[in-house]
Each structure stands twice: as C-alpha cells, then as structure tokens.
Image (cartoon, rainbow, N blue to C red):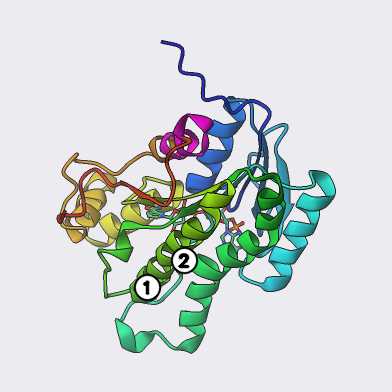
C-alpha cells in the first residue's frame, strides 16, 4: 500500500525541536518532504541540514514576537504549527514548594508560549483558510503527580482546554487544532533521570526505569514510548490524511491512564 502523507512542500514550525520529542518531530517531518523551522534557547548539538534553527526563549512575549517576525520574514507564514516546547523545572515538595515564581514559570513555558505563538501566526492561516495547529499536552493533565508536577499538570490542563476552545473557533474557518498527550517518552533527558534515580537506589538504568514506571502506576505495554513513535503519530495527525481530525486529544501512553 502506498501511504503518501501528502506533506511534500508544506512549511512547519516546531517549537523546542533541538532535543527530545521536538527533535524527533523535526526529523520525521523533514523525511516526508516538509520544510522545517524550529526553535530553542541554545543551538543544537547535531543540527540537521536544511532545517532552520532560531534561537529564542519562548517563555517571554518578546521571544515569541521575535520568532513570529523571523517566520513572517522568511516564509510569510506556516502551514503547520507544532507547539512541542514544554517541561517542568519545579522543585519537589508538593504544593508548599510552589511559589508564584515557579507557577508563572510553568505557565509561561507550557501554556503562554503556545497561546502567544498561535495568536501571532493564526491570522495568516485564517486568511488562507488552511492550516494545522498542534499542542503537545501530557497525560499528567489527567494523572497529576503531586510531589513535584502539580503546576506542570495544571498548565497542561489549561493548554488542553485552550486548545479545544481554539478548535471550536477556527476549525469552521479551515484551521485544524489538535492535541497529542504523551505518557512517559524515553527521551535523552528522561534516560538520564531514570539512570540517576536508579543510581540513588543502588541499581542500574533498567532498575531506575522500573521505578519510574511504578510511580506512574505501571505502563501496560511494559516500556515508555520512543520519541519516534510519538513523532510518527504527530506527523500523521498534521498531514492531509487526517483532514477530518480536529478538536481531539490523542493519548500515546502505552495504556498508562487507568480510566476510560
Ligand atoms: N518526556 C516525556 O516523558 C514527556 C511526557 C509527556 C509530555 N511531554 C511533553 O512533550 C514535550 C517535549 O518534551 P521533551 O521531554 O521531549 O523535552 P526536552 O527533551 O526537555 O526538550 C525541550 C526542547 O525545548 C527547548 N526549550 C526548553 N525551554 C525553552 C524555552 N524557554 N524557549 C525555547 N525553547 C525551549 C529545549 O532546548 P533549550 O533547552 O536549548 O531551550 C529543547 O529543544 C513537552 O511539551 C513535554 O511537556 C514529555
């Protein structure tokens, strides 16, 4: 079967595309003929030839404006916008460890970066009555881990609600809006984390991995997802083959979320 994703020649902006999931999405899109621009605060260790890298901090309004300016100057606009940037730097210790500065930092990274960038780039999509906006959320929005990720989980919850509302507004005007909600992804950073947890408990990476899976209540498929598996789902969803998919959240967690 020839399963052409029909993405050849499209222009995509992927935020946070130098590491982890974002880097896998950049590579996947490029492999199917998409012109890709991506962002991070620092330059990539292994830049891909043909990909445009823009160094900017997306937690600030100025950083987002600067990125939107580069997009307009180089391309005029984008066909696909993938908001992958996100994460958590909150300390452990439950609610009491989360002061205003931590809350605002988690909200700026996981919610406002996407809100601001969508606001800057959507008008050009709407003018063409075409485009796709995708938000990377997390299963933590329905499965928060209170020891250290309450603010991150709440920010992802807000991102998800925002995404649904945006979809209701702009899908009738030709722009699809989607969410992908990963469980644990085995990125380089999460391997380092599991190794550290394992070492602290006197075991190796496999031991640390089992500890993390236990904290999540287990992963029925028995392992985290690879960045490539999540990138494959995203690549399909932003393609014209998924033209009737909009407003929905697509969980990829190996069965981690235990409820319907
Ligand atoms: N990993 C998981 O298990 C997992 C699970 C569920 C959901 N997710 C979600 O998936 C997405 C990707 O996560 P990941 O784990 O793959 O991330 P990651 O490996 O930590 O990579 C994050 C990327 O974003 C960039 N970045 C970070 N802060 C930035 C900022 N302020 N401005 C601009 N760029 C910034 C980083 O580069 P610089 O550091 O150079 O800026 C990097 O390219 C996030 O939305 C995350 O919440 C991840």
Q: Which residues are magenta?
A: 231-242
Q: Measuring 19% from the left and 47% from the top, which residue is drawn there?
A: 219
Specify the quadrant that holds the N terminus.
Answer: top left
Residue 254: give x, y in percent of width and height.
24, 43
Specify the quadrant that holds the C terminus.
Answer: bottom left
Whether residue 83 can be seen here: no
Secondary structure category for the residue under label 2: helix
Residue projecting furthest to the front: 172
Query: Where, by quadrant of the figure, is residue 66 drawn?
Result: bottom right
Is 190 placed above or below 161 here?
above
Q: Nearer the viewer, residue 219 or 192?
A: 219
Q: Which residue is mark 1?
A: 154
Secondary structure category for the residue under label 1: helix
Q: Which residue is mark 2?
A: 162
Residue 64: give x, y in percent of width and height.
69, 64
User: Between marks 2 and 1, how big is the CA–CA gap?
Assistant: 12 Å
CB at disc 2 and ligand 1 closer than 8 Å: no
């Amino acid at each position: 079967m020839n399963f052409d994703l029909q993405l050849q020649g499209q222009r995509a902006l992927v935020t946070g595309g130098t590491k982890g999931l974002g880097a896998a999405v950049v590579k996947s899109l490029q492999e199917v003929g998409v012109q890709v621009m991506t962002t991070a605060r620092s330059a990539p260790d292994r830049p891909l030839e043909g990909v445009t890298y823009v160094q900017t901090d997306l937690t600030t309004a100025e950083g987002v404006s600067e990125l939107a300016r580069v997009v307009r100057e180089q391309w005029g606009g984008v066909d696909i916008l993938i908001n992958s940037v996100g994460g958590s730097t909150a300390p452990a210790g439950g609610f009491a460890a989360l002061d205003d500065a931590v809350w605002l930092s988690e909200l700026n990274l996981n919610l406002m970066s996407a809100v601001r960038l969508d606001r800057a780039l959507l008008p050009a999509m709407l003018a063409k009555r075409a485009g796709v906006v995708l938000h990377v959320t997390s299963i933590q929005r329905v499965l928060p881990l209170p020891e250290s990720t309450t603010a991150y989980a709440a920010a992802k919850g807000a991102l998800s609600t925002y995404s649904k509302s945006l979809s209701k507004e702009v899908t009738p005007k030709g722009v699809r809006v989607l969410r992908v909600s990963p469980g644990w992804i085995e990125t380089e950073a999460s391997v380092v984390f599991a190794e550290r947890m394992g070492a602290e408990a006197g075991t190796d990476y496999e031991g640390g991995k089992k500890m993390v899976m236990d904290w999540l209540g287990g992963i029925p498929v028995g392992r985290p997802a690879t960045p490539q598996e999540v990138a494959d789902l995203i690549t399909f969803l932003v393609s014209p083959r998924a033209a009737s998919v909009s407003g929905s959240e697509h969980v990829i967690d190996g069965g981690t979320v235990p409820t319907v």
